Image (tube, coloured by chain):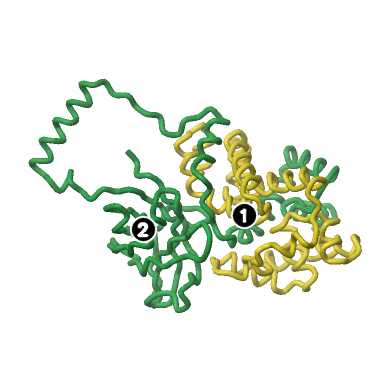
Amino acid sequence: MSIDSDDLNDLAGEYVLGTLAGAERVAFEGRLGREPAVMRAVATWASHLQPLADAVTPTIPPPELWQRIQRDLGIQARPKMRAPMWIAAAIAAALIAVAFLFPDLIFRPEVSAVAQLASPQGGAPAFEVSVLDDQKKLLIRAAQVSPVPNQSYELWAVPPQGAPISLGVVEATGETKRDVAENLRPLLAPGGTLAVSLEQQGGSPTGAPTQVMFVGALAPPPQ
Amino acid sequence: MLIACQGGDSEAFSGLYRLTSPQLFGLALRILRRRDWAEEAVQECFVTIWRRAKDYRPDLGPALPWITVILRNKCLDRLRREKPLQPLDESAAAERPDEGPSPLEGALAADDARRLKGCVDQLDEDQRKSILLAYYEGLTHEQLAARLAAPLGTVKSWIRRGLQRLKRCLEP
């Protein structure tokens, strides 16, 4: 490795850590926009230090924050389709017809929030959690997750402050249904955070998550 | 998801926010220790992500580290801007909730986290402490020297040597 690239790695490390300051930082950021080798060095350090960021307890930001971001950018993430009245009426009529034929399709338990739990490093969601019946029940679907022999996955509610609270062990395949204790229901509103950890068989021995594998925020169900 | 944002997909952007904002907000709170500042840092971070999504290069690595660098830079900008008004005094430091030396000691243990923790543990005490303080509290070389009661040059070399050792450990 040349002296130049050693020096570049030092600078990139200090840039990502944040100790590169003042004129040095400005000069380095200028190079970052132009030189592929600088971009690569920064990307490498960013990946190296990412576990430090992942290790912090997640906290749900207040809902207004997303509205402020949308306002700053002038975007609307969920454009409301305004269907003409007759289409709405036709759909309503069709739904009533279907309800007579297949009541299960229509009178499903009401979903109040859903969360896709994925690795903080990215990738497809591993579990999908639906909150049902006024937060009294959970339906947990294993999506992209590999069962680990002699270990269990455990679901946790992560309150804005304080330690995660167990919602029980979940199956690594198929669906798990779970009743929710009354005192935990407020944690399952949209905006709440859920996590799944990998534990010894049967669940965490300590009452705290051992290895957090997947995290996700509860959001209102798609309309 | 970030790739879809490059094409101006606001649904993907909303999904990215839902997925990543709790972790980013947690990190901003940890660094800034003020809710209003942390909210602003996350806000500025996502505004930048949307506007600069085209700068993200998937061939260089995953998106989350790229986003984390943006967020931490927003936090550091804020700290450095406010520094003259809010001198970091030791009494304020003493009142902070004690979260231990590093959240890395805590629960998360994905493979790469375990690897990084192993490498961080191999550093000298001074190197480890100064790197973790810089990361989680956004301290400059000068602030680190004051906090650790060590000469500036010494602190600079702890950081530099510590980072070099980390790199050798992570990229054998």
Please say if A16 is above or below A91: below
Q: Secondary structure at mark 1?
A: helix
The residue carrying mark 1 is B27
Q: Position of residue A181 (x, y in %)?
A: 33, 64
Q: Colour of chain B?
A: yellow
Q: Is residue B138 left or right of residue A161?
A: right
Q: Chain of mark 1?
A: B
Q: Secondary structure at mark 2?
A: helix
Q: Which quarter of the picture shows residue B169?
A: bottom right
Please check whether the numbered discs 1 and 2 fall on a single chain: no
Q: Position of residue B104 (x, y in %)?
A: 62, 67
Q: Colour of chain A?
A: green
Q: Which quarter of the picture shows residue A128?
A: bottom left
Quarter of the image that includes the N terminus of chain A: bottom right
Disc 1/disc 2 C-alpha distance (Å): 26 Å
Quarter of the image that includes the C terminus of chain A: top left
Query: Dot 2 surroundings within 10 Å: few (below 14), some, or many (20 or more)?
Result: some
Residue visible at 83% across and 57% down in the picture: B143
Q: How many marks?
A: 2
Please say if A79 is above or below A2: above
Q: Position of residue A159 (x, y in %)?
A: 48, 59
Please say if B171 is above or below A106: below
Q: Chain of mark 2?
A: A
- Residue sitting at the far left: A101
Q: Position of residue A33 (x, y in %)?
A: 73, 38
Residue type (three-letter) at the residue carrying disc 2? Arg
Observer-nearest of A185 and A146: A185
Residue type (three-letter) at the residue carrying disc 1? Leu
Q: Is residue A125 left or right of residue A36?
A: left
Residue visible at 47% across and 40% down in the picture: B14
The residue carrying mark 2 is A185
